[in-house]
Image (cartoon, grey):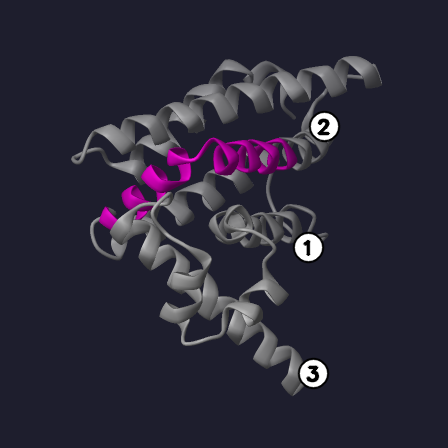
């Protein structure tokens, strides 16, 4: 049985979530550049000094949702009880995520998020850093799935496969951003299947 979360920690998490939600709403409504930290705090019903205790900048707020997702990914891919191969995990993870973001309102809100994330070079740079962390975790896990004896070759091959999978993911996301009728979940899984077939001779 898990121990209850301390009240102070619960309140801190609730405040943080209020700020993230308020920021997301304002970014979508009026754009990233036009949104101020004061406006976000007001939208959340909090003082701006409270905001600064949780986030040091607007970039941190804009990337907060992605950082939370990365934390979840890190725990899931390193879970000792995880079943299946790394690519099977990625297929289920990415497919499930695609369904969640598109089932809410046909994906309109998620497209808005994509637009404001790319609006600011500073936010784009932070997201690129997070993407590298995803790829590092992915490669770390994938190494164990490769039937290659030489450790350096195994490491480099894992990186190559991850770069290919991540590039396919970015391609699908770019298509989704531009095409309202694009089926994100179906196409995400289809691209993973194609990459897996390409490297099938190296996977256990």
Q: Earlier in the sequence, mark 2 or mark 1?
A: 1
| Secondary element at tag 2 | helix
Q: Is residue 26 above or below residue 143?
A: below
Q: Identify the secondary structure beneath mark 3.
A: loop
The front one of 148 and 66 is 66
Q: Which mark is residue 125?
A: none
- Residue for point 34% across, 51% down: 27
- Alpha carbon separation for disc pair 2 and 1: 17 Å
Is disc 1 surrounded by few (<14), some (14 to 19) or many (20+) residues within 10 Å?
few
Which residue is pictured at 46% across the width and 58% down the height?
Answer: 37
Front one among 66 and 46: 46
Res 21 quadrant in image: bottom left
Percent x, y for residue 20? 46, 61
Q: Are marks 2 and 3 in contact (CB under 8 Å)?
A: no
Residue at 51 percent of width and 68 percent of height: 48
Q: Residues within 10 Å of mark 2 (few under 14, many from 20)?
A: many
Identify which residue, 78 or 170, lies in the foreground.
170
Q: Which mark is residue 143?
A: 2
Relative to 123, say whether 3 is above or below.
below
On the image, numbered disc 1 is attached to which residue?
A: 81
- Asked if labels 1 and 2 touch by Cβ distance under 8 angstroms, the answer is no
Nearest the viewer among 75 and 81 is 75
> From the image, which quarter does the N terminus lie in?
bottom right
Whether residue 196 is visible, yes or no, is: no
User: Would you say 106 lies left or right of 19 here?
Assistant: left
Q: Earlier in the sequence, mark 2 or mark 3?
A: 3
Looking at the rendered structure, which numbered label has been put on residue 1? 3
Q: Which residues are magenta?
A: 108-134
């Amino acid at each position: 049985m898990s121990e209850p979360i301390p009240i102070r920690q619960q309140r801190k998490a609730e405040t943080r979530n209020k700020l993230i939600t308020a920021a997301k709403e304002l970014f979508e409504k009026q754009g990233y550049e036009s949104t101020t930290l004061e406006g976000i705090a007001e939208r959340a019903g909090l003082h701006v000094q409270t905001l600064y205790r949780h986030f040091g900048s607007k970039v941190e707020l804009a990337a907060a949702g992605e950082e939370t997702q990365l934390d979840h990914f890190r725990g899931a891919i390193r879970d000792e009880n995880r079943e299946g191969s790394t690519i099977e995990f990625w297929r289920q993870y990415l497919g499930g995520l695609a369904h969640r973001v598109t089932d809410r309102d046909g994906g309109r809100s998620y497209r808005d998020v994509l637009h404001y994330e790319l609006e600011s070079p500073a936010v784009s740079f932070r997201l690129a850093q997070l993407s590298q962390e995803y790829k590092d975790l992915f490669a770390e896990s994938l190494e164990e799935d490769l039937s290659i004896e030489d450790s350096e070759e195994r490491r480099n091959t894992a990186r190559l496969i991850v770069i290919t999978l991540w590039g396919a993911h970015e391609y699908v996301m770019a298509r989704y951003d531009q095409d309202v009728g694009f089926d994100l979940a179906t196409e995400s899984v289809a691209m993973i299947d194609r990459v897996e077939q390409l490297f099938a001779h190296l996977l256990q």
